[in-house]
Amino acid sequence: MAYNKKNKKPMPKKDFRKSNIPTVKPKEANKPKNTELIYRPEMTVSDIALAMDVSNAILIKKLMGLGMMTAVNQVLDRETVELVALEMGYTVKDEVITDLTRYDEMEIVDDPKDLVKRSPIITIMGHVDHGKTTLLDSIRKSRVVSGEAGGITQHIGAYQVEHQGEKITFIDTPGHAAFTEMRARGAKVTDIVILVVAADDGVKPQTIEALQHAKAAKVPIIVAVNKIDKPSANPDNVMSELSSHDLIPETWGGTTPYVMVSALKKMGIDELLDVIILVSEMENLKANPKRLAKGTVIEASLDKGRGAVATVIVENGTLKIGDIIVCGNTFGKIRTMNDDLKRRFTEALPGTPVEITGLDDVPRAGDVFMVFEDEKIARQTAEARASKERETYSKQQKATSLESMFGAQDDGSKVLNLVLKADVQGSIEALKGMLEKIDIEGFHANVVRSGVGSISESDITLASASNAIVIGFNVRPSAAVKSLAESQGVEIRLYNIVYRITEDIEKALKGMLEPTFEDVVTGQAEVRQIFTFSKVGKIAGCMVTDGVIRRDGKATIIRDGVVIYKGEFQQLKRMKDDVKEVRQGFECGISIVNFNDIKEGDIIECAIEKEVEVD
């Protein structure tokens, strides 16, 4: 018996059954508290270990036991997740998404009674010059690329035709290597891929590239062997080459339909459409026209007269005029709908491509749209999605200057994100071409956005979100845009000679960007009124809207955001007096040396040359 040392009294016998020491039954010690694993796409080993409440090392050991060598950040497919979950006593269930900001990931199950047959969505792919666009043109019986340089389609267009009472939707993706990403985007929304191969040219690298995109999309492939009318045509050679890529013709005992066509002579077109209808029937394509519409953006642009314009394909539901939609990070109310022939629609059924207006901003190609019943909820959803995207990017390093942003990635490559804005489309193409030719090991230029016109606030927002710099060629930002760029840490670099852009990039990559002179903008003035004098010509009555206009500075005339003239100040007057400078908020008279074509609404920008040291 135990005694208390102080009073020598016997201590009561401790009842260990009432002790605070927890007792664990051996069988329950390793039993998981929650045996359900909620599966989400793109889950990594680390994500799964966290969900199972085990260490990464334990999970990797389990995977090694199953014969799989994995890293912590490696993404596992569902089959592998189920296998390892079974080993560890878990059952796998799909995540049920209820968050409206993830509407594009939601899977809505329709009542089978409401499902009806819908138009198949067809993507035409193939090597450049193999007749892909001509084939589509023959199908539509009208020219679709009239006036486009080189015959290369530089956008994804969507068109619908009718054959034997059945409607077929076509997505035209470009065949040129420069538009690989756009071709991949086209494959994501398609039901059937038509792979166009020239009978006289055979399988080319871009043919294989298109084939890989189609296989990744897991959709049926129909091979259209084109140019069979040519004397040098050899269809058997095409079939033989593609058979090595698992596209074995039906006539050889395989499952891939091959159709012999001549797009130029319009031979085999009906047979091709017959095969498309047959394959689509086998796919049993159905949709529910009674529900709110959901679909994908194929193409989007900003039209000066109509605002944001987007070409969309309705994949499920019926889209109507007046519908409130969220499209990526933007939302709006549909004002107009029309097809490629500008025919107006009041509603678009599943499988129908239409061009819509009414969005408050330009969405991105590939964005998923969905119709909402409540405008307030739609607005909040779009804003939340935009905010979530900004938060995701804010975790990355903020965009800084050209010299410091070439950070090495995990694979050692250097990535430069760019937003390109220029005065004309030709300048954009020239810049892209020159960037592709920069030959520095480990370098990769990623053009996040390119467009014609002045640098806008949305360009700055995108640059901030994607850790990019803004390159302006013969365009200028407004004072508000410059202020936004400064607040968000985005650098804007302005040029008027194309090769200097690539020179700066090459020097920065090689660590040799030397101190340079650049024009530092001191202020801007808006032309309010024009006065004409016989001796001195035109004098612009201006209001200084930002900074200071200096008599000894350089003058740049900007009209609708585009630079139209660069020169020197001839006169700077305040009232009737010649002055050296005029500050913001004051009126002044300005005349430019050798320039008389000044108009009301023009912006006169003043800049001084300054030496800039590179850190």
Image (spheres, rainbow, N blue to C red):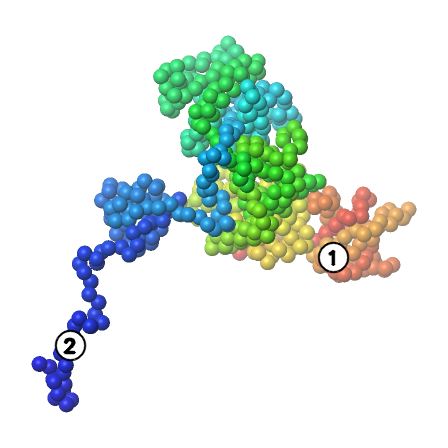
Q: Residue 24 at what x, y percent from top left?
A: 20, 62
Give, as a three-letter code, the residue at label 1: Thr
Would residue 342 appear left or right of 123 to someone viewing this image? Answer: right
Q: Residue 14 at what x, y percent from top left?
A: 15, 77
Callout 2: few (<14), some (14-19), or many (20+) C-alpha neighbours within 10 Å? Answer: few
The residue where tag 1 is placed is 545
Give, as a three-letter code, the residue at label 2: Lys
Q: Residue 502 at what x, y percent from top left?
A: 56, 42
Specify the quadrant that holds the N terminus. bottom left
Q: Count of labels shown?
A: 2
Quarter of the image where one finds residue 292: top right
Would residue 211 appear left or right of 610 to someone viewing this image? Answer: left
For the point 64% across and 33% down, which residue is it? 345
Q: Report the disc number at residue 168.
A: none
Q: What is the spatial separation of the Cα atoms under label 1 and label 2, in whole angstroms?
A: 87 Å
The residue where tag 2 is placed is 14
Q: Is residue 122 above or below residue 31?
A: above
For the point 38% across and 21% down, which residue is it? 255
For the point 47% across and 25% down, which residue is it? 280
Q: Considering depth in this image, is 322 or 227 the residue closer to the camera? A: 322
Element on which disc 2 rests: loop
